[in-house]
Image (cartoon, rainbow, N blue to C red):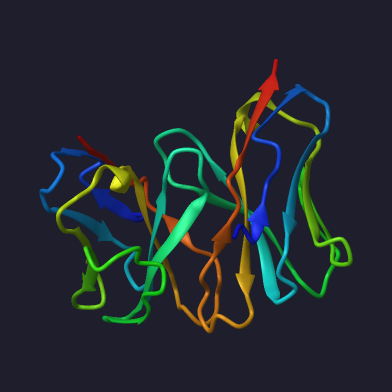
């Protein structure tokens, strides 16, 4: 039972264009959503987050959008740079867990072409 | 400052042997988490420590898996009688607290291969 889904395993985008990474979830009881970026042979690093009471959060080139009615989360990267090439994981924190246990999606590999 | 470190970075073991994976969290972080990533899968939660106690062990896949944390710092994940399906990257993360400050900092992982 995959509660957090990233249906696109990979995405290629030209440098300077927008990258849009998508994430769907099935549980309405998530408090926070996060995006992590992972380079090969490194652990995931935190990128940006959004509370379930908001619908948008922006940090520089990165914007996360939350559509609660559709149970959909997206990460926009504008403009995309070659250094953004990595695997991106969305994660959710259930409000009922009592702990900050992340539930991760399967990841989307982004390749930004120079 | 030092981040989360894990050792070994790679471990190859024969089926049926026991393995120990180590995690050194960021100094001062009271919460520690273990996850694993199997091929083609997302990161799967295994266990959470707050200090030395483990209030959430719900992700441990079987009784062959155990973990401990001593001195509120270093943690060891032990897999007994390893099986081929245990092959994965095991990731450790820490955060300031398990009940607030939700950003988790991850180590580089230990790649376990069971032959």
Nearest the viewer among B88 and B33 is B88
Write down the quadrant of residue A50 in the picture.
bottom right
Image-based side of A113 in relation to A44, left or right: right
Locate the C terminus of chain A by quadrant.
top right
Q: Where is residue B106 in the image (x, y as percent from the top left)?
A: 43, 54
Q: Relative to residue B103, is residue A9 depicted above or below?
A: above
The residue at the point 13 percent across, 39 percent down is B14
Nearest the viewer among B77 and A27 is A27
Count of numbered labels shown in the rendering: 0
The residue at the point 34 percent across, 56 percent down is B4
Q: Relative to residue A43, is residue B79 depicted above or below?
A: below
The residue at the point 10 percent across, 48 percent down is B17
Q: Where is residue A16 in the image (x, y as percent from the top left)?
A: 80, 25
Q: Relative to residue B88, is residue B75 depicted above or below?
A: below
Image-based side of A110 in relation to B18, left or right: right
State the residue lying farthest toward the left. Answer: B17
The residue at the point 20 percent across, 44 percent down is B8
State the residue lying farthest toward the top. Answer: A114
Locate the N terminus of chain A by quadrant.
bottom right
Image-based side of B112 in relation to A80, left or right: left
Nearest the viewer among B46 and A46 is B46
Q: Can residue A40 be seen in this view?
A: yes
Q: Position of residue A79 (x, y in %)?
A: 80, 32
Q: Where is residue A37 in the image (x, y as percent from the top left)?
A: 58, 44
Q: Can residue B110 be seen in this view?
A: no
């Amino acid at each position: 039972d995959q509660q957090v889904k990233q249906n696109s395993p990979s995405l290629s985008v030209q440098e300077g264009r927008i990258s849009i990474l998508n994430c769907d979830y099935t549980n309405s009881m998530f408090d926070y959503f996060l995006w992590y970026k992972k380079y090969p042979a490194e652990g995931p690093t935190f990128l940006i987050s959004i509370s379930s009471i908001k619908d948008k959060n922006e940090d520089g080139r990165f914007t996360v959008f939350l559509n609660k009615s559709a149970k959909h989360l997206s990460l926009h990267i504008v403009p995309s740079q070659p250094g953004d090439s990595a695997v991106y994981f969305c994660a959710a924190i259930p409000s009922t867990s009592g702990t900050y246990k992340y539930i991760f999606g399967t990841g989307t590999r982004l390749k930004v072409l120079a | 400052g030092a981040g989360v470190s894990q050792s070994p970075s790679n471990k190859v073991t024969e089926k049926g042997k026991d393995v120990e994976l180590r995690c050194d969290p960021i100094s001062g972080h009271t919460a520690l988490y273990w996850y694993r990533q199997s091929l083609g899968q997302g990161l799967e939660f295994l266990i959470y420590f707050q200090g030395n106690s483990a209030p959430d062990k719900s992700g441990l896949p079987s009784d062959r898996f155990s973990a401990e944390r001593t001195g509120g710092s270093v943690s060891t994940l032990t897999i007994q009688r390893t099986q081929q399906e245990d092959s994965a990257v095991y990731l450790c993360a820490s955060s300031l607290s398990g009940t607030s400050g939700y950003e988790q900092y991850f180590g580089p992982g230990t790649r376990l291969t069971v032959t």
